[in-house]
């Protein structure tokens, strides 16, 4: 305050001029400005907060799986999730099916709730008269990401899976069963493992946190023994080589090819080929539930020779992709 601020002989008066603090910076004396908290990951790497993940560009681009056709808001949800013009799928979900009928609906419902990445869902059947076709195509009317396609490679689950991976538009293909035994909430995690560099990501029933509920006891014992021994002795990277619920790099599959033509032995085939090629394999625990309705098409007596072939193949020195394909071609020529 200066001398002009006080009247002579009277009390001093404060100036009418107020000091205005800037809006940014200190809100009151002594208070340190606060920023929105930001979490950090390992090695001090900043990780977006939950709010940022929900509202940022990555969240806006993400497209979950398949909305149920019974939901009147299905078409609007699809447009909102995929963005205008649709989104390039990050994962192709391959669902080999045989006469599932209306049972395919609940499986697609669970995919709708669980898969959060942009995806396509390919329901593969062997015959246009298959009872799966009608319900699957009705479901697809609500979401163009679903396609029910007819396998032209020959009958059986191996050919259906082979056809589906060849038809996949995404760089990652996840095979899951039409009977609902697999946990679809793990599809995103399996896909991300492949995006990080593994060529096969397995959902494992036989590692810590995994479980098999129901199903034939002999089948479970044999698959558990095969998977654990392959990991221990051949260092395959997974304790569950025989489980069909896996994610694959489509580039890897097209590089080495698929030789199986009968059952579900593709899972162990591609694990064995990754091992001989020296490519990385990873696993996460899963809980497998035996189907609650219908009859399983698994034919253990018929398909066990194929499993044994690829079990033996997992042992041996490293091979190139050309050598692996050459061995398959030579075996095919001998069989003809």
Image (spheres, rainbow, N blue to C red):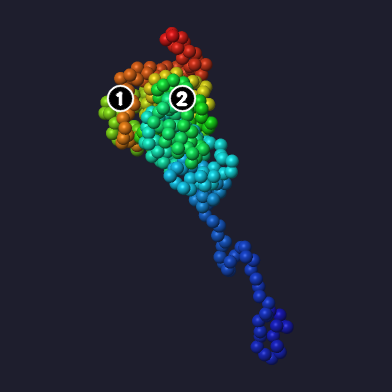
Residue at 38% across, 22% down:
263
Out of 332 and 238, give the one closest to the viewer. 332
Cα distance in 3D space between marks 2 and 1: 30 Å
* Residue lying furthest left: 217
From the image, which quarter does the C terminus lie in? top left
What residue is disc 2 on?
Answer: 151
Residue 115 location (% of width, % of height): 46, 40
Q: Quadrant of residue 301?
A: top left
Q: Is residue 117 above or below residue 17?
A: above
Residue 15 location (% of width, % of height): 68, 80
One can see residue 302 in this view: yes
Residue at 70% across, 83% down:
5
Kindly indicate whether the residue at mark 1 contacts the one at mark 2 (C-beta within 8 angstroms).
Answer: no
Out of 312 and 144, give the one closest to the viewer. 144
With 289 as the anchor, is 54 left or right in this view? right
Secondary structure, mark 2, is loop
Residue 131 location (% of width, % of height): 39, 31
Out of 324 and 121, give the one closest to the viewer. 121
Q: Nearer the viewer, mark 2 or mark 1?
A: 2
One can see residue 45 in this view: no
With 36 as the anchor, is 131 left or right in this view? left
What residue is disc 1 on?
Answer: 222
């Amino acid at each position: 305050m200066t001398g002009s601020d006080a009247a002579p002989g009277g009390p001093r008066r404060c100036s009418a001029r107020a000091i205005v603090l800037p809006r940014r910076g200190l809100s009151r004396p002594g208070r340190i400005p606060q920023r929105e908290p930001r979490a950090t990951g390992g090695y001090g790497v900043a990780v977006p907060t939950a709010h940022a993940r929900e509202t940022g560009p990555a969240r806006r681009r993400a497209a979950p799986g398949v909305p149920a056709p019974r939901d009147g808001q299905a078409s609007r949800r699809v447009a909102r999730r995929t963005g205008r013009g649709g989104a390039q799928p990050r994962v192709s979900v391959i669902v080999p099916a045989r006469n599932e009928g209306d049972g395919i609906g609940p499986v697609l419902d669970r995919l709708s709730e669980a898969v959060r990445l942009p995806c396509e869902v390919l329901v593969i059947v062997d015959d246009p008269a298959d009872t799966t076709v009608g319900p699957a195509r009705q479901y697809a009317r609500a979401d163009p990401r679903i396609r029910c396609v007819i396998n032209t490679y020959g009958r059986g689950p191996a050919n259906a899976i082979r056809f589906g991976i060849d038809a996949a538009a995404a760089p990652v293909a996840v095979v899951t069963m039409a009977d609902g035994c697999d946990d679809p909430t793990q599809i995103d995690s399996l896909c991300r493992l492949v995006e990080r560099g593994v060529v096969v990501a397995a959902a494992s029933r036989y590692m810590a946190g995994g479980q098999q509920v129901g199903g034939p006891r002999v089948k479970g014992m044999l698959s558990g023994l095969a998977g654990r021994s392959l990991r221990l002795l051949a260092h395959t990277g997974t304790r569950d080589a025989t489980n069909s619920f896996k994610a694959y790099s489509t580039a890897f599959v097209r590089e080495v090819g698929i030789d199986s033509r009968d059952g579900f032995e593709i899972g162990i085939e591609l694990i064995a080929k990754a091992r001989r090629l020296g490519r990385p394999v990873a696993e996460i625990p899963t809980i497998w539930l035996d189907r609650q309705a219908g009859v399983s098409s698994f034919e253990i007596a018929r398909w066990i020779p194929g499993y044994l072939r690829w079990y033996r193949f997992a042992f041996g020195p490293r091979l190139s992709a050309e050598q692996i394909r050459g061995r398959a071609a030579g075996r095919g020529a001998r069989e003809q």
